[in-house]
Image: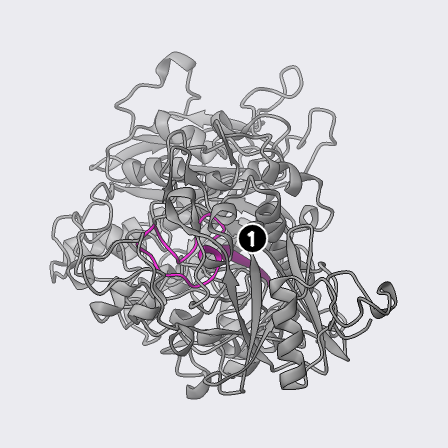
Amino acid sequence: MLPRTFGSGMRPEHFSHKTVGKPAMSYGQRDAAREMAKKNISVLEGTPHPRGAHWDGKGTNFALFSAHAAKVELCLFDKSGKKEQHRISLPEYTDEIWHGYLPDIGPGTVYGYRVHGPHAPEEGHRFNPHKLLLDPYAREYHGRLEWHPACFGYKIEQHPDDRTFDTQDSAPYVPKSVVTDTRFEWRPGTAGKTVPWDQTIIYEAHVKGFTHLHPAVNEKLRGTYAGLADPQVLSYIRDLGVTTVEIMPVQAFVDDKYLVDKGLSNYWGYNSIGFFTPNPRYAANKQAAVREFKQMVAAFHDAGLEVVLDVVYNHTAEGAELGPTLSFRGIDNASYYCLQPEQKRFYINDSGTGNTLNLPHPRVLQMVMDSLRYWATEMHVDGFRFDLGSILAREKNGFDVRSGFLKACCQDPVLNGVKMIAEPWDCGIGGYQVGGFPHGWAEWNDKFRDTARDFWRSKASAAALRPRLCASDDVFRRRSRRPWASVNFVTAHDGFTLYDLVSYNNRHNDANHDDGGHEDNRSWNCGAEGVTKDKNVLRLRRRQMKNFMATLLFSQGTPMITAGDERARTQEGNNNAYCQDNELTWINWKDTDLSKEMLAFTRRMTSLRQAYPVLRHAHYLNGTPHTENGPQDVTWIKTDGQPFEKHEWEEHIRCFGMLLDGTVPPRPDGPHTENATLLIVMNGHYGALPFTLPAHGPVRRSSKWNRLLDTNLSEARNIAHRFAAGEVYTVTARSLLLFEWLEET
């Protein structure tokens, strides 16, 4: 390739002697040639693919999509990111992608874009070359956003009107992109091994919050990718019995201006601005965030743990029409965002955050797919949880299971090998889509959360809980989907912690300085709001936390535990702590009697789940004999020890048993098994009830029900004890029991 000092697609040999001195150059190309001669930097035409800044060992190719831009300028900065040293017009425009190749430009180069084009908000265009823009495909960033009026494309100081045009240079106040050397030597085994879905236990955690107060982690590494990879941290997670860590958003995001103005920050991170960039705020070495993230993933894989990323492709941090111009808005607003058809100045807001990313556009869809493949292949993550996932499958007529995004994922050979988990709702019309995603996807199941919470506060019957214990087969059992498609949870980052769920009736969000957070928590404080010394209340809260944890881990489907629940972590009643980057949200590693008891209990529950295959069937339970006069995979037991008849399921029933027969083959044509048979007894009633332990199969004198768990007993007293079939067991109010059937010869 020759230096670009001539017109687009033209080399010297294309001109006669009469025209060589005055080639037909466009405005942008003439500027580029003049700049190269002035700065002694050569620029070649490069290629339109791949997009982003890619170093090949000799130079860097820059490629940026914009369907409506008139000119794209590449701005190169010094290493501090403060001084703009060169401004170069990308010389070529192919398939709506601006591109150019700069020899001798390599890793560590700090850069940004200025994009020229029409400023016509009513037509959906918001170009402003005074605003330095992040590369959507950048692998690393330099610096952090400093909120200043120059960050906005319009004049914000007085009577904000997004139709005005601001000429302040935003470069001093915005983060910049960095050319990155992504090479990394993955050791054998660090690529990770996929955990089968029926053995998966998800653990939702925050990079900073998990280790910021951890006494065993080097103080300089706390709250970072390196801190999360500390051997003692990984040992704790592995010993907890979970298999898969779902990490809250780490793709680059910014702190909202309104939060910064209140002295707060966007702690959760659902405010993305870069889909290829690990957030440098979580890196101990800010200049090597990519490498540090890869080292963290390798350490997780060495420990036998999967890494799933919580990703936010439904919107960006640029907000609505009064938001800042940081990247996409200034590159090609009309392509990257869903705009209101009749008023293109305004944005469709299915995300509830001001804008919606335009995935039906092929280049935007390509960016998302490129991002997913990058994290899966280059960063070696094991799966994704999609925030407000319904938005990604929206087409013109709403959610569509045949949308471009879902079809692209379904056929993608890379994504077929990783875990794909949807949060199946959004804020738009028809956005609630639990059970609506296609095969190959798992989904957060809020029906499980709500029904489990209601049952243990005596607001839902046994009949309502029954399908939730069976992987919500009434919702997910279609198109050959498996029980693992239901991701069951009682708590998540959004809402009360487990301790707060049993300690507060109402939200207490004063620290947020706003009125956000759900009022319908389906919580019960057990008799006192918040902190109390009442021993009876505290005893009941302990039991309720155990009831929830056991219900979660004994149900069919895929369980998800929120980090800290196993230690009875509290947020003091704050059910929307998205902006609390402080001790309210960081895990407290100081041991208490309660934290030690809950930790031991949770470890035992995960161990029981892995030990007994009947708690995690690969196929849905049918409740009918697989052979004539044969056993049923699940039998529902009344308090008198007899099976329920269909007409006996009444709304007032609060106590029942769930008998899981381990001898039933997993498929109708499958072999007979020798797995253990279990009996789960749940009493959601406010009083103790007698429960007759049922007979199972041919009852011999030596056959017994061996008690494995009673949530009314302390861990020290929860030792195995055997009971005969037909014996009456007094089930404590609001408690859960687990028995194993033993046939001794």
Q: Is residue 360 left or right of residue 719?
A: right
Q: Is residue 242 visible?
A: no
Q: In this rendering, is residue 236 above or below 322?
A: below
Q: In this rendering, is residue 652 above or below 572?
A: above
Front-most of residues 447 and 9: 9
Expressed as whole percent of the image width and height from the top left, the position of residue 475 reads 48, 28
Expressed as whole percent of the image width and height from the top left, the position of residue 630 reads 63, 21
**Residue in view at x 48 percent, y 65 percent:** 250
Front-most of residues 81 and 264: 81
Q: In this rendering, is residue 263 above or below 655?
A: below
Front-most of residues 678 and 124: 124
**Kind of residue indicated by mark 1:** Phe
Magenta segment boundaries in residue numbering? 305-329
Q: Where does label 1 land, which residue?
A: 384
Whether 423 is among the magenta residues is no
**Residue in view at x 43 percent, y 55 percent:** 316
Q: Is residue 482 left or right of residue 60?
A: left
Based on the displayed image, in which of its 4 quarters is residue 329 positioned? Answer: bottom left
Tell me which colouring the rendered structure shows: one colour
Q: Is residue 145 visible?
A: yes
